[in-house]
Structures are given as structure tokens and as C-alpha cells.
Amino acid sequence: MAITDYKVTATPLTVGVGSAGDLLTGSTPAELAANKAIFDAFPDAIKTEHDDLIDYIDVKPLSFESTVAAATANKGSFSGWVPTGAIIDLIMTNGNTAAAPTITIDSVAYTISGMPTVAKMSTSTAQAYKLKKTGADTLVFVSLPDYVCEYGTSGEWKYERRSNGKCLSWGKITGISITSSGSFGSGGLYLHNGTFSFPSGLFNVDPEPFCSYSLSTVTGGIFVYSTSASAGGVQLLRSNATATTIGVPIHVIGTWR
């Protein structure tokens, strides 16, 4: 946000800092910047007392991007004042695996409580979390209302990690080898079995896969299921016992934290 984009007010702010009648306004960008510099130097308690003016003026954008390594606890230093109760958007290009991360904003070292410590899926994506200021130096991970923390692709899979802990993944998974385990019933059908893998590290417990598929050689239906948090199986009925490979569109619902 450019300095000229700040809204202004003619309401005097007399808080014992600077001269009586100092205004959070300005007729030029330089004058406004000078008055903002005075305001930025106010103690946190005084700023909180004047939240009505802070909201009107839109003091600082509350979105930060951290480029530090995932395992590094200090996620970086940034400028901008954070009112109590404010929500911060923190984007981490390398994700977060630190158990007790911190972030420094205007020389205040904030501890971050409740942030997931799950590595991101690939180098081409990032993780984004919302944090709420609940104390003078405390930020808490906010999961609701629900939002996407990370999304991307992993092989043939697309995926979303959501703040409420839900994880979605979908794609047409090709190259699944199926072999017959023998005849099924008396109608000339053969039961075939195969296996496939979920994106590595995406789910923390066994997810629930589903499929919707039409194949001329599938006579009695197709079924997918999970065998672990990282793998699943497929069963289908065919009219012959010949081994083959198939591609199956699969949707998966699970959790990641």
C-alpha cells in the first residue's frame, strides 16, 4: 500500500506523545509519512486505546511472506503494527516444520501457538496460515472459517490441505496393474486386484477413496479402498482372467493434521 493510499482524518489525537493536537493526516505524502512515523512510535497500549482511528486510517497491511527454511524457528522480521485481535496472513514459501516458530514484527518477537508442523508437498508450492494476535507477544493459528493452507500437484494427483484439517486429493491414476485372483461366482467373471499409491506424506491416517469409472471390460463394478495412509487397492470384475493395466479416476477425502 503506497503512502498516498492511506485514508486521513481531521480528528485530533492528544495522547501525550509529540505535541498536543498532532493529527494523523497530511496534505502531502511527506507530511502524512511524518505524522505516521510519530504514530508508529506510540506505545502499544496507547495505540490500542485509539483503535477507532487505527481502523479508519488502515495503518499497515497485515500480510507477510517468510522465505526462511522450513525447520528454522524464527520466520523472519517485518515492519507493521498488529492490533490485539487482528488476523495476520503468513505465507511461508518453504513451509514450516519447526515445533515452536516465532515471527518478529516491529521488533516484537511473537510466539506462534498451534501452527501445523507438516512439511509442504513439493518445491513448487507454499503454505499459508492465518494467525490471530491474542496477547502482547502471542499469535495463535486460526483454522476457521475454513481456508486452503496449501495446494498443488504430486505426480498424477492434485491436492488441497485445508485449515480445518481436511485434505482432498483427486486425479486419474494410470498404470495400475491388475491380476486375476480367480473366478467369481458361476457367471464367467474373474476378480482382479491391483494397488496404487496416494501422494507421499499427504495424509496422516488412512483416507477414504472413491471412484467413478466406466470400462467396457468391467462387468460387475469397480471398488477402491485404502490399505494405509500412503497406499490403496482396487478390485474389479472382468469377463476374462487376462492381467492388464488400467487408469482409474479417484477422489480421496482424509486428514493431514
Image (cartoon, helix red, strand yellow):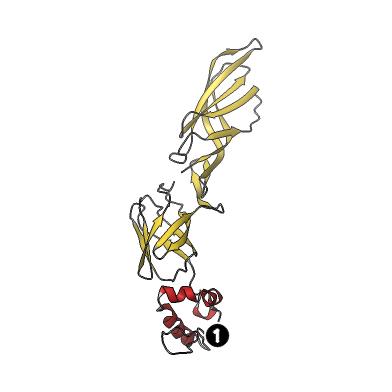
Q: Residue at x 61, y 20 (%)?
A: 237
Instruction: Indicate the position of residue 106 as horizontal and vertical percent values.
Output: 38, 71
Q: Amino acid at mark 1?
A: Thr
Residue at the far top in the pictured view: 186
Residue 253: quarter of image: top right
Looking at the image, residue 128 lies above or below residue 188: below
Element under disc 1: loop
Q: Residue at x 53, y 44 (%)?
A: 166
Numbered-mark total? 1
Front one among 101 and 135: 135
| Left or right of 184, for residue 88 | left
| Left or right of 131, for residue 103 | left
| Left or right of 71, for residue 132 | right
Residue 80: quarter of image: bottom left
Instruction: Indicate the position of residue 31 as horizontal and vertical percent values.
Output: 47, 87
Query: Label 1 crowding class (10 Å Cα cut-off): few <14, some 14-19, many 20+?
Result: few
Front one among 234 and 65: 65
Instruction: Indicate the position of residue 249 as horizontal and vertical percent values.
Output: 59, 35
Query: What residue is shown with label 1?
Result: 11
Instruction: Indicate the position of residue 179 as horizontal and vertical percent values.
Output: 52, 20
Front one among 195 and 146: 146
Looking at the image, residue 130 lies above or below residue 171: below
Q: Residue at x 63, y 17 (%)?
A: 239
